Amino acid sequence: MPPIVAIPAVIGEGKAFVVIADLCGVTANFLNCPGVITMSQDFNPDAPISVLIAYHARERPHAEALVFENQRMSWGEFDRQVNQVANGILAAGIQRTEKVAILAENSPAFFVTLFGILRAGACAVPLSGMADAGALSLMLEDCGARLLFASANTRVLADQARSGNDRLPDGHCIAFDAQEDTDWINFDTWRDAQRAQPPSVEFDARDPFYLIYSSGTTGVPKGILQSHRSRSSYWAARASYLFGTTTRMILSTPLYSNTTQFALLPTVAWGGTVILLRKSDAATYLTTAARERATHTMQVPVQYRRLREFAGFADHDLSSFVWKFSTSAPLSAELKQWILAHWPGKLTEIYGMTEGGVGCTLHAHDHPEKLHTVGMPAPGMVLKIVDEKMQEVPPGDVGELIGWSPYMMDGYYNKPQETARARWLDDEGQLWQRSGDLGRMDKDGFVVLLDRMKDMIISGGFNVYSADLEAVLSRHPAVRDCGVIGIPSEEWGETPLALVVCIPDVSISEEALKSWANARLGKLQRLSAVEFRSELPRSTIGKLLKRELREPYWQKTSKRIA
């Protein structure tokens, strides 16, 4: 009989479970003893992700856990590599709850490393390759990571970011791709030198799960800290979306993004297959989705738009799809209608924030009359719309969205003042997360999202919400993409300007489009001008970077309203 390794773990205050694992790392049984949660071999979605990976590896070792280009990884192999990565991290001297950073594009190595960090009891810090070296240096310093993983396309950036960082000496930087640099360790060689049996690690539900930094488009990025407790509640709540062992989730958004994590974590937790793409490409996505018989997907609005515009969309068999998700930016009502009409399966739009607490879901297939909304408060969430005095407003009135949920962040890492500003404590001692988003709730409880508070346009003393103007513009057949910002105005303080990307080969003048839109807008909403652009700046997950759009118009003005 092989040796037995016990891995104690706490999943709630005063409650614990014990994993019994053999040398192959594929056994996950639960003891029946005082003070321990008892579980049969049946699946329990409330368990930590490391336990669930071991469970699925034992139950279905030959089933596919990951598909990436021409590579396929079974659950048994996935679990084995997760153990190896975890053991390597521990051998590097990383202690429980310490931060381990990843700066890389999508790959099987990234996928395995993310879960290896968690199995080692450490906290994963996925970093964006879209950030500059200065911002990345600040993130590495802020999180205190003593171990960094990177890939070929990010290693130069990683070297710049870690320059002068004493926490990342030689031997603590691991490269996912083969290379000749003497101060980077080859990942495959490093991983294969580690033991394949599971490490003995203690967990607590309050331990950090991951630290995700904001996009940094409004200043120095803030680290958003999520615990194991919040994450396990998160994927346990996804059962209603038909996650299970037959799920085949196709993903092309970056693994470092919380958008991707929304779909990735429940797929892994429920024992499905992740079909991971290196990057977003309409042709590759459609070919892969059809070949692999994908059942679920998470896409951001700009990706759905590109798929709609792809000439060969109708040539691909997408009949296997069960559910599609969209998040990270508003999905227009017109685009929702197209998805429902041309793409089999259900469609859910998710409005939320990495910080948690505030979120809505719109099941578009069930509510075709509410496509202009972001839906109702998500299950388990309590949502309010409040005025500037934090008093709840009646249906139809505009205010800030605040909320509470089991998925709320632990706070902004090392930023207690920022954390305090993002929260509100009511008279009864209830803590609420502030969103900074403006919206209104209709009589049926559906939320219409209007604007970021910082993006709201104040023209002549009246509030103008860019979402209302963008919704009108997007209905014009010539408009492919658009964004409305406030620019300086001697008469009004600021005034709305539309920046528009037109569909190729569709002819319309800027003045004609302005007149068309203003004929459909209220007198106080009217556009002062329309400017055509070849493209609009967006983040890797499709967020419109309005700060970049505004900057040229306000840089010579001392009074910055927006």
Image (cartoon, rainbow, N blue to C red):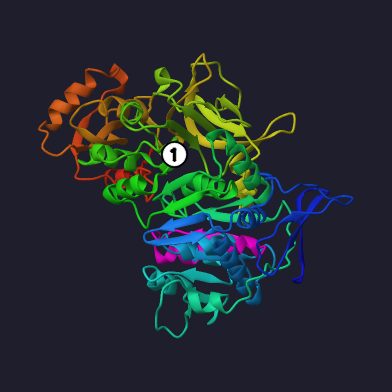
Name the quadrant containing residue 300. Answer: top left
Figure quadrant of the C terminus: top left
The answer to if 124 sits in the magenta stretch is: yes
Expressed as whole percent of the image width and height from the top left, the position of residue 483 reads 30, 36
Query: Does residue 14 appear in this view?
Result: yes
Q: Residue furthest top?
A: 443
Name the quadrant containing residue 166. Answer: bottom right
SS state under label 1: loop
Residue identified by numbered label 1: 327
Give left or right: position of 415 versus 186. right
Expressed as whole percent of the image width and height from the top left, the position of residue 481 reads 26, 37
Give left or right: position of 438 versus 529. right
In the image, residue 192 sits, relative to residue 130, either above or below, namely below
- At x 60%, y 30%, the residue is 379
Q: Residue furthest right?
A: 34
Residue numbers of the magenta segment: 116-139
**Amino acid under disc 1:** Thr
In the image, residue 99 sits, relative to residue 363, either above or below, namely below
In the image, residue 293 sits, relative to residue 199, either above or below, namely above
Expressed as whole percent of the image width and height from the top left, the position of residue 64 reads 50, 55
Expressed as whole percent of the image width and height from the top left, the position of residue 275 reads 43, 52
